[in-house]
Amino acid sequence: MKVTKRDGRIVDYDRNKIILAIQKANVEVDRYEQVSEETIDSIVASIENKKTDNLMVEDIQDMIEQKLMAERKYELAKKYIIYRYTREMVRRANTTDDSIMSLIKNSNKDVMEENSNKNAYIASTQRDLIAGEVSKDLTKRVLLPEKIIKAHEEGVIHFHDMDYYLQSIFNCCLINIGDMLENGTVMNGKLIESPKSFQVACTVMTQIISAVASSQYGGQSVDIRHLGKYLRKTRDKYERHYKEKYGDIISDEIRERFIDDRLRDELRSGVQTIQYQINTLMTTNGQSPFVTLFLNLDKDDPYIEENAMIIEEILKQRIEGIKNEKGVYVTPAFPKLIYVLDEHNCLKGGKYDYLTKLAVKCSAKRMYPDYISAKMMRENYEGNVFSCMGCRSFLTPWKDENGEFKFEGRFNQGVVSLNLPQIGILAEGDEEKFWALLEERLALCFEALMCRHHALEGTLSNVSPIHWQYGAIARLKSGETIDKLLHDGYSTISLGYIGLYEVTKLMTGVSHTDPKGTNFALRLMKRLRLACDTWKLETGLGFGLYGTPAESLCYRFAEIDKKRFGEIKDVTDKGYYTNSYHVDVREKIDAFEKFRFESQFQKISSGGAISYVEIPNMRHNLEALEDVVRFIYDNIQYAEFNTKSDYCHVCGYDGEIIINDDLEWECPQCHNKDKNKMNVTRRTCGYLGENFWNVGKTKEINARTLHL
């Protein structure tokens, strides 16, 4: 038998430790209160007779207490409880030493790999991670109820971002960049006035992004349509300049050429400023700002033509990439891009289809942008189209005192996620037991989410002036609390979930793509949504069902359950759980059917949802990608593409690895031919085997048909 310790370690069962603990308590009570050696042996035997592969150390201690109480040895049971509590206090007294020292020595892999956007070897990141370990320690020992910590450590739930819980900061937001550019802002005690040109607006925007990122722990999104006004200002400035300087000396046509040349030069420089600033600025979190640019052409926008130019330039520069330290063009991690498909650009003959074709080309080479269907989003959000926050969670519609919808300047308070497969494992196929367990765990999630909320109540605007006083979220007074922004649905609190596929498999024996499984999965999703809606009615807070929590959580929950319950076919044996409502990657389903199927869950999971398909050889499959993009517009709200790409570890080249005349793989950048130093996921004919969703338009090519 194995025993799972409090820190997750699994050790061999040792009966002598149990005997010693009871004996230590035994000697501290009167002999009439003591138990005999035979009784101690009986208690140990009752534990061993459980005949289970693994027991939690807390469960063993609970059984000992129950047995002592059953023997009517109340004083002894009390001593044992005190002994157990004392040992717990000793363990908790200084729990950060090992984790912090291992961070300094670069050996704490769990913490170092938790956030792929952070370089855990550099001093600024280590400083942030060390602070995070202290926060986790205090959160577990002092700040959160013990049952929530226990549930987190047992993988019942996941209390996100404990490393920031100590501070009064929130998760992610939609920056009110329009207000900050129009009305000015303050950074580091210095007034930043409204920009007079496009390039200055781009510079100010990146400074705001950096300042915001340093005072929150999640992502942020910026709607670039607010820059169109400043590109117009730049055009007007150049028009005045050339009219004043040359008057009637040059023709109107020549003057327009000059203006257009200067305008496009500033456009390129401004967009380059955004890309380079975001990728070179380092926030106090030890990483580049986690930011998303929202690329949306609103037909009612008076600056729509300027914004079309800005979007075009952003996509062109993203296609080019950014040079790494070796001088090789690579795909930058940030900013992330979201491109909105609407009537005028959904590849059905619209005026701005050329931008969508450019976006598809960008997706094929650089994996971004993601795509939002304005048509589907309007159906799901009362006619509104807006960006998700950097963490991919969506706000619920909210109206101000004038009855106007407002999305920018709002935020997410925090996230708690539910491990659905674990409930299915414990229910053993019994639906009555499953729904009862689900109710218990939803109640626990609610309590944990309210801890998130209460931790922010009473926060003064002074803790982050850029957020609360100078426009990113609000313009509160110094010393004013943020409480009014926490209530009435202005901000959201998110219930995440992992493993709809696995829990459906456990409860019905089939995937949630099977009609029988779909019925169960939809009932479960609707219950989760009802919980959020009910909590919102009861509290007035903005609860949302969030279907895209951290990818690492898919592995954490699966690892915990595998240790506790062993290997379960199609569940714990894979080493991961499927994120949210997604179709398992091993299912044979084409891109169109996958999107069509998952769209029904996006409607329910309105607090956060994204779907993706994996398509082979995207760079040579543009027509197929365009077909999928058309399909996205009519069928699913939020989607992205994944692919397997070639990569050379010698020089960093991330283009297509070629086959030379000797039929060898060769990097066209540095001419490396060592297969072990390259990721080559294609075959010579482009066939990828079964690990992708075929886009449905072309036949799968058999490798044997290739002629070299």
Image (cartoon, rainbow, N blue to C red):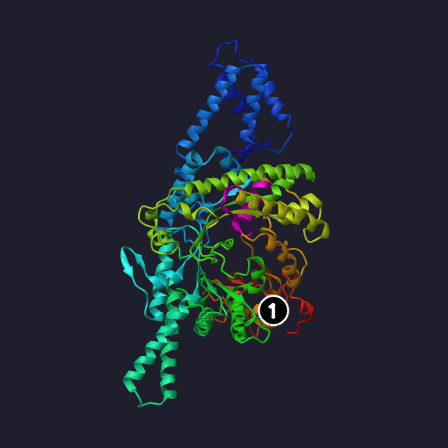
Q: Residues within 10 Å of mark 1 (few under 14, many from 20)?
A: some
Against 26, residue 527 (above or below) is below
Direction front: furthest residue: 402
Residue range of the region highlighted in magenta in the rendering: 538-561
Position of residue 682 measured from the top left corner of the image (x, y, whole percent): 59, 66
Q: Residue furthest top?
A: 32
Q: Is 112 inside the magenta-drawn segment?
A: no
Element class at badge 1: helix
Residue toward you, 62 or 313: 313
Look at the picture and state if 22 lies above or below 245.
above
Q: Residue at x 42, y 36 (%)?
A: 143
Residue 289 point in image, percent of width and height: 40, 57
Q: Position of residue 568 (x, y in %)?
A: 65, 43
Tell me if residue 554 is in the magenta stretch: yes
Screen quadrant of the N terminus:
top right
Amino acid at the residue labelled 1:
Arg
Horizontal side of 250 relative to 421 (left or right) equals left
Q: Percent from the top left, x then y, of residue 693? A: 64, 62
Q: Closest to the observer: 27 or 191? A: 191
Quick check: can you spot residue 282? no
Q: Write down the residue under mark 1.
A: 630
Q: Is residue 523 left or right of residue 681?
A: right
The residue closer to the viewer here, 229 or 10, is 229
Q: Is residue 226 above or below residue 256?
A: above
